[in-house]
């Protein structure tokens, strides 16, 4: 089976959906969860689901991106699900086109440093956009920059707030992310 690692920094609602999706899959399993925030909700999910997890410490992360550790754990692909640190070069080199991210907007707009979570939704609402959406993309050395694998859109209506938009976006993410990962793996796995 293909072994997936999920990196996350927050509540982990996307991580939960991905874990559920692959629970009985012959193709892949979520084998490891990495998190840079010791009190993040995603770590409780790891415990509850009996999935190996580890805290990502800044120093080691910057040094080698935990590359040896991930190899020891026989990780094949890395999924970023609300992970808010930039991926260091050694990790990109060790997992070429094997790391994907989900971004809560329609890239190439509303991406880049500082554009994450509610900051994205605030900017989109402030600019009176008519639509937003999600982007699933390869990770390269720039923030929110690699080739796009999948996008889905939602309409923004009068009265929408950053909070209501965040809810719509989460719904889109939960609906599409696990399936898009599966299709991407089918095209890329051993
Ligand atoms: C998701 O909406 C994801 O797109 C966003 O963080 C949220 C995590 O929610 N990611 C970024 O902003 C990355 N730049 P979750 O912890 O409930 O899955």
Image: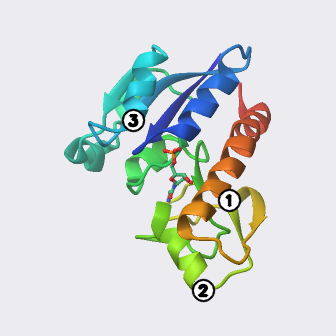
Residue 7 picture quarter: top left
Mark positioned earlier in the residue sequence (2 or 3): 3
Q: Is mark 2 within 8 Å of ligand 1?
A: no
Residue 125 lies, with reference to residue 104, above or below; the image says below
- Residue beneath the point at 45% across and 26% down: 45
Image quadrant for the N terminus? Answer: top right
Disc 1 and disc 3: Cα gap in Å?
22 Å
Residue 155 lies, with reference to residue 31, above or below; the image says below
Disc 1 and disc 2: Cα gap in Å?
17 Å
- Residue beneath the point at 63% across and 32% down: 17
* Residue contact at pointers 1 and 2, CB within 8 angstroms: no
Q: Say which element carries label 1.
A: strand
Q: Is mark 1 within 8 Å of ligand 1?
A: yes
Kindly tell me whether residue 170 is visible in this rendering: yes
- Residue beneath the point at 57% across and 74% down: 110
Q: Say which element carries label 3.
A: helix
Q: Which residue corresponds to mark 3?
A: 41
Image position, residue 14 (x, y; %): 58, 40
Residue 31 lies, with reference to residue 147, above or below; the image says above
Residue 155 picture quarter: bottom right
Which-is-in-front pick, marks 1 and 2? 2
Image position, residue 27 (x, y; %): 73, 20
> Could you say which is closer to the camera, residue 130 or residue 35?
130
Q: Is residue 90 left or right of residue 79?
A: left
Q: Is mark 3 within 8 Å of ligand 1?
A: yes
Q: Which residue corresponds to mark 1?
A: 134
- Residue beneath the point at 39% across and 26% down: 44
Q: Which residue corresponds to mark 2?
A: 127
On residue 53, which mark appears? none
């Amino acid at each position: 089976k293909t072994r997936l690692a999920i990196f996350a920094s927050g509540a982990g609602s996307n991580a939960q959906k991905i874990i559920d999706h692959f629970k009985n899959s012959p193709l892949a399993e979520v084998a490891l969860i990495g998190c840079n925030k010791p009190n993040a909700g995603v770590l409780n999910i790891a415990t509850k689901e009996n999935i190996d997890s580890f805290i990502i410490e800044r120093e080691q992360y910057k040094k080698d991106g935990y590359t040896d550790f991930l190899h020891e754990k026989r990780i094949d692909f890395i999924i970023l699900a609300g992970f808010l640190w930039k991926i260091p070069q050694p990790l990109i080199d060790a997992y070429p086109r094997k790391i994907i991210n989900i971004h809560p907007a329609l890239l190439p707009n509303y991406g880049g440093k500082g554009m994450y979570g509610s900051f994205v939704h605030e900017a989109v609402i402030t600019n009176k956009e008519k639509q937003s959406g999600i982007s699933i993309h390869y990770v390269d050395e720039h923030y929110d920059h690699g080739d796009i694998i999948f996008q889905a859109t939602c309409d923004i209506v009068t009265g929408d707030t950053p909070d209501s938009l965040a809810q719509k976006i989460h719904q889109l993410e939960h609906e599409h992310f696990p399936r898009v990962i599966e299709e991407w793996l089918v095209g890329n796995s051993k």
